[in-house]
Image: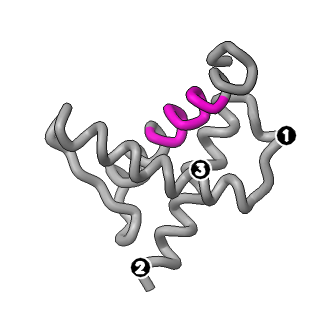
Amino acid sequence: MGWIIALIVGGVAGWLASMVMNRDGSMGIFWNIVVGCVGSLIGNALSGPLLGVQGTVQAFSLTGLIIAFIGAVVLLAIVNLIQRGRVR
């Protein structure tokens, strides 16, 4: 059951991040889920040592969603930087 919640929360986080980074038109639901789940891993890797905050997307929590969203924004910024040579 946890992986279903992780996919849903990852999809929402990826969708929100793609809206913020202005990439919503070029991404479908599959890539939103991928970006959200990978963003969750990045967010947890950054927030744990830096802030001492851990969040998970396997059991829905607002902290986990926020961390996944921030990680997804970081991931999309890196992708934009590589593809276009600029962050936005």
Task: Tell whether 68 sits left or right of 32.
Answer: left
Tag on residue 25? 1
Task: Give the number of the disc on residue 68.
Answer: none
- Say whether marks 2 and 3 touch (CB < 8 Å): no
- What residue appears at the point 47 percent right and 68 percent down from the top-left corner? 6
Q: Is residue 15 above or below residue 11?
A: above
> Toward which corner of the image does residue 11 lie, by quadrant?
bottom right
Relative depth, front residue between 75 and 4: 75
At numbered mark 1, what does the secondary structure look like: helix, strand or loop? helix
Name the side, left or right, on which 50 lies relative to 41.
left
Is residue 80 found left or right of 62 in the rendered image? right
Residue 8 location (% of width, % of height):
57, 67
Instruction: Give whichever of discs 3 and 1 has the lower sequence position.
Output: 1
Region rendered in magenta: 71-79
The Cα atoms of the two marked residues, 3 and 1, are separated by 14 Å
Tell me the crowding category of disc 1: few under 14, some 14 to 19, or many 20 or more residues within 10 angstroms, Cα based.
few
Residue with the mark numbered 2? 2
Residue at mark 3? 35
